[in-house]
Amino acid sequence: MDIVIPTIRDLDFLDEWRFALENHHLIIVQDGDPSRDIEVPAGYEYDLYNWNDIEEELGDDRWIISKRDSACRCFGFLMAESEYVFTIDDDCFPAKNPSGERVDALAQHLENLEEPAHPEFFNTLYDQEFVRGYPFSRREGVPTAISHGLWLNIPDFDAPTQMVKPNWRNEKYVDIVQTIPEGTLFPMCGMNLAFNRELIGPAMYFGLMGEGYPWGRYDDMWAGWCAKTICDHLGYGVKTGKPYIRHEKASHWKSNFEKEKEGIVWQEEIIPFFESVEFSEDADTTVACYRELADAVEKELTELDDYFGEMAEAMRIWADKWEARQ
């Protein structure tokens, strides 16, 4: 499993993660000034990419990787080579379960990804324990493409919710993993996320966000809407629940609102768009689905804003780059 970390600062937080991450390969994507040296604790094996490296790799297409936004992490996805990818933010630390034991988030994500998912029929208990009335014909399940982990302490709130609940913290550890049902979208958070690169990697493009673009903080949401729509079409599963991480640093609601305000309005149109997407019979791979999705974005969402024409073109280039890397 490759671990992808977007950052603008030194990675001291990795000292707390040695027990889980030290023997795995890190891919660090440095946003901001490429002349600044990022310090990584000794003992880790890693590749570090900055904006000079991104330009060298992508050339004239470097614009598809966002600046001043955690969406830059998807360059790390592009450079990854392992079967699985785990991405985490630099303000996230190991959580503790109710027994006081540190949670090995990577190991739990790996377990989620290697066990089948069950999106066709909702299981009211755990992902692998079936209740009375669950069809035996559907218990084998489907391959799991995405493992979406959760957070203790500071939750992943949007700016308006941050404003009205500034001191709310999540202290509830729920010992459960469940499959998100087929046909149901979800708000995907990128700060504790793992996925099967071979199954869904081409859809994990975090879009055009941040510097030069009309919105931010919707990068992971965009990738989640795209990926879940494609998973439903291809018969892959998405899980959510464990593992937990401890999220320590809350960004300010006012600055978040400036980044989110277009998205808060746009999402009311974008989500119904994704809910109505239909793929052709020829869309039998993730890349093929993603190209059809890019065409649909250009056709349907440019009515919302011309920006989505540029997003569609970035999606096509991303698909080309992904295939070329493979």
Image (cartoon, rainbow, N blue to C red):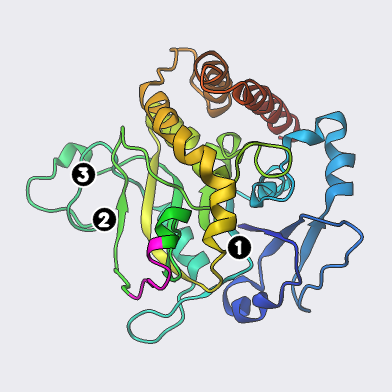
Q: Residues within 10 Å of mark 3 (few under 14, many from 20)?
A: some
29 over 102 or under it: above or below: above
137 over 240 or under it: above or below: above
| Local secondary structure at mark 3 | loop
310 over 227 or under it: above or below: above
Give the spatial CA distance, label 1 vs label 2: 29 Å
Left or right placement of residue 10 versus residue 180 in this view: right
Image: magenta residue range: 164-171
The image shows residue 36 at horizontal and vertical percentages of: 88, 64
The first of marks 3 and 2 along the sequence is 3
Give the residue at the far left of this rendering. Answer: 132
- Residue 163 among magenta residues: no
What's the residue type where badge 3 is placed? Phe
Determine the residue positioned at 71% across, 35% down.
Answer: 326
Tag on residue 142?
none
Q: Which residue is mark 2?
A: 128
Tag on residue 122?
3
What's the residue type where badge 1 is placed? Asp
The first of marks 3 and 1 along the sequence is 1
Determine the residue positioned at 60% across, 34% down.
Answer: 202
Q: Which residue is mark 1?
A: 89
Q: Name the front one of labels 3 and 2.
A: 3
| Local secondary structure at mark 2 | loop
Left or right placement of residue 211 versus residue 177 in this view: right
| Local secondary structure at mark 1 | loop
Give the spatial CA distance, label 3 vs label 1: 31 Å
Asked which quadrant contains residue 215, the reply is top right
